[in-house]
Image (spheres, rainbow, N blue to C red):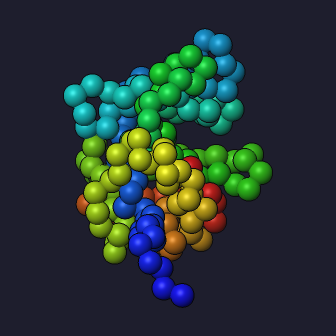
Amino acid sequence: KANKGGAAPAAEVTVSALDIRVGKIVKAWEHESSEKLWCEEVDVGEETPRKIASGLRAFYKSDDMQNREVLVLCNLKARNLGGFPSHGMVLCASNADHTGVEFAVPPPGAKIGERVTFEGYDGEPEAENKLAKKKMFEKLAPDFKTDGNGEVVWKGVKCMTSAGVCKAVNGMANAQVS
């Protein structure tokens, strides 16, 4: 039976909906009331650094955070994490039981603020409110991983900057990226 007058089927959500950019943690400090969170200021090429909270204290020390180049999911709505206004997510690879976590990082020479690309998935990123409302990251996340070489991929397509492929900082292979 033909669909008469119904809503058009939703377009497939692809990785191009995400605004993932090269960032640099310019300042990191311990969250005053959470043992798990780092509070960070991350330069993603905007006028002022973004404030982002990351649950990485079990995995990284302050010195590991400072001046670290990372990949940042930028089109998440700002929200309070432990009372800290967090506007984005520092992406990491993690193993299945979450006992190992590594930063997802750009290659040397990548430009701060550059949006990463996935070949064959062009398009502008979605607005923060649409990304949240339609739960787009949650739909894309199962296919966002590292491959056998520790390179960041979505559905097997490499995450690239103009300087080359992005990867887990220590090469964690076959891991989930979030």
Q: Residue at x 45, y 70 (%)?
A: 6
Q: Residue furthest right?
A: 97
Residue 66 visible in the current orientation: no
Residue 16 lies left or right of residue 148; in this view the side is left
Q: Residue furthest left?
A: 47
Q: Residue at x 44, y 35 (%)?
A: 77
Identify which residue, 89 or 43, lies in the foreground: 89
Residue 171 point in image, percent of width and height: 56, 59
Residue 21 point in image, percent of width and height: 35, 47
Q: Is residue 47 above or below residue 100?
A: above
Q: Residue at x 28, y 57 (%)?
A: 124
Q: Residue furthest top?
A: 32
Q: Residue furthest bottom?
A: 1
Q: Residue at x 33, y 53 (%)?
A: 125
Residue 12 point in image, percent of width and height: 45, 69
Residue 178 lies left or right of residue 22; in this view the side is right
- Which quadrant of the figure has residue 157? bottom left
Residue 42 point in image, percent of width and height: 38, 31
Q: Is residue 162 above or below residue 147?
A: above
- Which quadrant of the figure has residue 120? bottom left
Q: Quadrant of the N terminus?
A: bottom right
Residue 155 visible in the current orientation: yes
Residue 74 lies left or right of residue 122; in this view the side is right
How many numbered discs?
A: 0
Residue 78 lies left or right of residue 47; in this view the side is right
Q: Is residue 73 above or below residue 85?
A: below
